[in-house]
Amino acid sequence: MQFADRNEAADKLADRLAPYRGRRPLVLGVPRGGVVLAARIAERLAGDVDVVLTHKLGAPGEPEVAIGAIDESGHVFLNDPRWRREQAAYLARVAAGQLAELRRRRNLFSAGRAAHDPAGRLVIVTDDGLATGATMLAALRVVRACQPERLIVAVPVAPPDTLEKVAALADETVCLEAPSWFTAVGQFYLDFGQVEDAEVVELLQGKRR
């Protein structure tokens, strides 16, 4: 399956999530691409939209290869605990930089508004696709700590091994495609243009109004 763009992927996910319409779900997007899906799914399901902020931690010399992720509290989740022993100085430096970026994003995206509280709510966490899943795994741990009523992961595409890891942290997993020949999220989109901060702000403000 190949999606025209993130909106089409969101519509297909919303179709699968249709039973939750009327329960006012809280749909949390992983910035930035995931917020495009979150806003559209929230609109289709008559829910609320917000962001869940985590950031990938890239490998030394290969910043696009995730070795883990960091959340807003500064907690670091690693795919392999050996990174903490073998690259402690590098990890501390990269984590500090990404934590500062998360705080910048929270100030920008929330713009003085309180974030939606997941406690006791039906929560759907979405992104435009998963590769290693490190950022999504961190996001799920953050949301789970808030004690939602039900925690659902909804993504258009992910490799099977990543999907298995993610499913272990969720109450339900909705994924449209899980091909064994997965190489990159972008290969499943005709239009996979970069999403800018301004678009995220517009999507969140439009929904909150």
Image: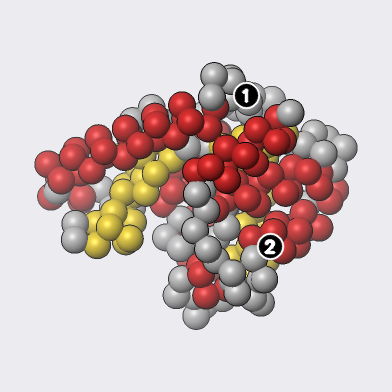
- Mark 2 lies on residue: 9
Camera-nearest residue between 47 and 17: 47
- Mark 1 lies on residue: 117
**Residue 6 shows in this picture:** yes
Which residue is at 54% across, 27% downward?
A: 110
- Where, by quadrant of the figure, is residue 22 drawn? top right
Give the numbered dot on residue 106.
none
Quick one: SS at disc 2?
Answer: helix
Quick one: SS at disc 1?
Answer: loop
Camera-nearest residue between 88 and 50: 50
Which residue is at 57% across, 50% downward?
A: 34
What is the distance, in whole Å, between disc 1 and disc 2 at their CAs? 26 Å
Q: Which quarter shows the N terminus?
A: bottom right
Instruction: Kindly identify the amino acid type of the residue bearing the numbered disc 1.
Output: Asp
Which residue is at 55% across, 66% downward?
A: 192
Q: Are marks 1 and 2 in contact (CB under 8 Å)?
A: no
Q: Position of residue 94 (x, y in %)?
A: 23, 43
Give the class, few, some or many, for how many residues have Cα within 10 Å of label 1's Cα (few <14, many ≥20): some
